[in-house]
Amino acid sequence: MKAVVIGAGGQARIVYEILQFNHNIDVVAFIDNSPRGSDEDIMRVPVLGPHSVVSDLIDDGVEGFIVAIGDNEVRSQHFEKFKNMGLIPISAIHHNAHISPSANLGDGVVVQSSAELMTNVTVGNNTIINTGTIIEHEVSIDDNAHVGPGTTVAGRVNIGAMTFVGMGCAVKENTEIGKDVIVGAGSVVLDDVAPGLIIAGSPAEIVGINE
């Protein structure tokens, strides 16, 4: 399948390298709305923009896309936009990641190197599971979330849509983290977190509102 990567930053480079191990995916371009020079490329793949160029690429046989942008809100908007253009969301699963046979992954998911997704884990559409993250048994992560590098999520945790869990966090078992939450890097989450909060610290405490 011919596909495009949406975005041209660091996350896009990671995603492209992951997709190189999937011989069924031929990435023909990175798509970015920022102004681009006519000869710009990433790893010899052209960077094109604005988004309107995708219509021509579809005419040339492009069928798939993946959004490689860290910001949850921006990634969510782009995911819906390109789905509505008729493109098929693809996932990027690193060959060194461990995915349990009982795990259930949505569309457009990124799972990076050395991540561990254990028994009966559910990951929603357009979600990023970053490098070295451990997601234990029966965890549910909703759409458009992002779990940072080196984070450990214990069993039977629920993480809401659009929530960002920073790098190096630890989340206690049987915990509920609502939607639109930001968990600061290195935090230890021991209690349920209501939607729309910003928390940080060890143990994590409320430090603001995610407006």
Image: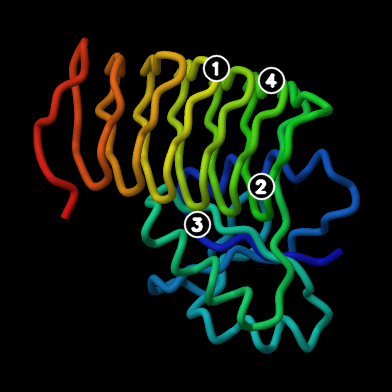
Q: Mark 4: which amino acid?
A: Met
Give the residue pinned by disc 4.
118
Name the residue: 39% across, 18% down: 171
**Residue 198 as seen in the image, left or right of residue 139:** left
Give the residue pinned by disc 3.
8
Give the residue pinned by disc 2.
16
Q: Quadrant of the N terminus?
A: bottom right
Marked residue nearer the N-terminal end (4 or 3): 3
| Frontmost residue, 17 versus 166 | 166
Q: Mark 3: which amino acid?
A: Ala
Could you tell me which secondary element the residue under label 3 belongs to?
loop
| Frontmost residue, 33 versus 202 | 202
Residue 94 placement (x, y as % from top left): 72, 32
Residue that lies at the very extreme toward the left in this rendered image = 207
Residue 103 placement (x, y as % from top left): 74, 32
Callout 4–callout 2 Cβ contact below 8 Å: no
Name the residue: 78% across, 88% down: 59
Marked residue nearer the N-terminal end (4 or 2): 2
Q: Residues within 10 Å of mark 3 (few under 14, many from 20)?
A: many
Give the residue pinned by disc 1.
155
- Mark nearer the viewer, 1 or 3: 1
Residue 144 placement (x, y as % from top left): 48, 52
The quarter of the picture where residue 181 lies is top left
Q: Quadrant of the C terminus?
A: bottom left
Q: Mark 2: which amino acid?
A: Tyr
Q: Mark 1: which amino acid?
A: Gly
